[in-house]
Image (cartoon, rainbow, N blue to C red):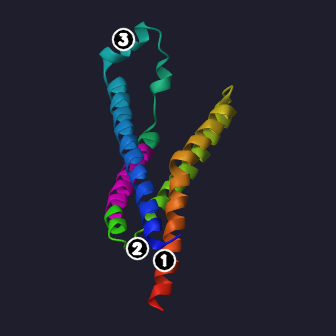
Amino acid sequence: MDKERLFKRAKGWNTFIIVIKIITVIFTVLGLVSLYAINNSKEVRDQLIAVGTDMSVFETSTFDNIISIIILIITIGIIVMAIMNSKKMKNQELFNITPYILIILLVIYSVATTIISAVSLNVPGAMMSIIINMIISILINVLPSVIIISSYNKINNIMGEEQR
């Protein structure tokens, strides 16, 4: 595959990642705001209790909240780096693979915490949830990241050969 097609493929997958990560940030912020509202509004809690909602589902630890905010910040950083990479890809310049490595690491973290939670809670059907989570994470996050990293390596090799 020639350099132009590699840049075009990387740019297409990079755009996909930007869109997915923006959607992720929106839903994460909405989720955090909802949890904050539920946990800090007596009126909302009373309404949920009145309809028979198990309030323990909404309880999160300070550690969980801190981790969620850290992941949110990392995800915003990934978006910023991916947007900067998009400009470099358009100009057919070497780009930074850090955001794609971070995506893979976040998926590994997500899968690990899902497995640990499922095992510790002994939830029936948890294995199916883990398998579905892993498949979706791989298809939406890991696969595009690996394709971009692979394209980067091929582009780097082509550019190295051109300089000789």
Residue at disc 1, secondary structure = helix
Position of residue 65 measured from the top left corner of the image (x, y, whole percent): 41, 40
Residue at disc 2, secondary structure = loop
Q: Which mark is residue 22?
A: none
- The residue where tag 1 is placed is 156
Q: Answer yes or no: do the residues labelled 1 and 2 have beta carbons within 8 Å?
A: yes
- The residue where tag 3 is placed is 47
Determine the residue positioned at 37% across, 71% down. 92
> Is residue 120 visible to us here?
no
Among numbered discs 3 and 1, the one appearing first in the sequence: 3
Specify the amino acid type for callout 2. Answer: Leu
Q: Which mark is residue 94?
A: 2
Question: How far apart, in angstroms, are the residues tagged by discs 1 and 2?
Answer: 7 Å
Specify the amino acid type for callout 1. Answer: Asn
Among numbered discs 3 and 2, the one appearing first in the sequence: 3
Question: Most prominent secondary structure in the magenta stretch?
Answer: helix
Specify the amino acid type for callout 3. Answer: Gln
Determine the residue positioned at 54% across, 66% down. 150
Determine the residue positioned at 53% across, 69% down. 1
Q: Assess disc 1: are there few (<14), some (14-19) or many (≥20) residues with their C-alpha within 10 Å of its C-alpha.
A: some
